[in-house]
Image (tube, rainbow, N blue to C red):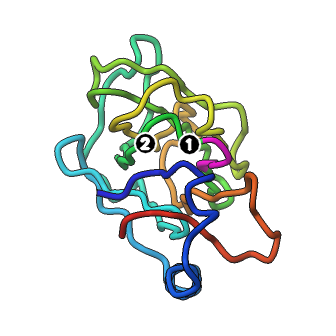
Amino acid sequence: MTYLPDARANSGASACCRLALILIATVADATPETASGQSCFAPTVLTPGFYYQVDTCQSSFSPQQLCGELFPTGPTVVFTFYVAGYSASGYTLTVSPSVGFDPALIIQTPECGESANCPFAIDSGGPGMAETFDLGILERSGQYFALVTSTNPDASCGTAQMEITYGGAGDTGDGIFRSGFNY
């Protein structure tokens, strides 16, 4: 499992560990992962510093209703990530869609599915507009699920890029992801 660490914990990391994380981030940025999370039972694990290619049109998971009030108009891709302690401050989850796709980003915990708790649902952009979520507002540690779907019947499925980035304290602005993750 990959946990979002407390950003302050990395300040004393040795030079060898910082170098290894820089190398991992460099390779990660160059190679997109393919999101294959077709259900809540087999989600794709999100790792900060990597980005994932999402194609909801290829998913076989099509919930009829989420959060009691959202009605997806197309298939859904499922991701999971873990927060250790209250340490997600400075991390952002972003879904950047292709032109014409209108994604909705649903955060569920501690379970995933049609009847699961949805503390957050982000669907403020239109077709082709990114949806972002500040992970720092999560109120507990543990497992979370991030579902990418659409509630727009005219843009019900499509492709996108999904990633968790860090931009909090200690970010040098040089585009290199640094963390204290246990890879």
Q: Where 128 falls versus 106 (above or below)?
A: below
Q: Quadrant of the N terminus?
A: bottom left
Q: Is 28 in front, or is 70?
A: 28
Residue 1 vs residue 45, the one in the foreground? 1
The residue carrying pointer 2 sits among few (fewer than 14), some (14 to 19) or many (20 or more) residues within 10 Å by Cα, namely: many
Could you tell which of marks 2 and 1 lies nearer the N-terminus?
2
Residue beneath the point at 61% across and 44% down:
102
| Residue 83, numbered label | 2
- Residue type at mark 2: give it: Val
Residue behind mark 1: 88
Does the magenta portion include 90?
A: yes
Q: Nearer the viewer, residue 100 or 2?
A: 2
Q: What secondary structure do most residues of the magenta stretch adopt?
A: strand
Which residues lie in the magenta part?
89-93
Residue extending furthest top? Answer: 68
Residue situated furthest left in the rendering: 41
| 107 in magenta | no
Residue sitting at 34 percent across and 57 percent down?
A: 45
**Labels 2 and 1 touching (C-beta < 8 A):** yes
Q: Is residue 63 above or below residue 75?
A: above
Secondary structure of residue under mark 2: strand
20 left or right, relative to 56: right
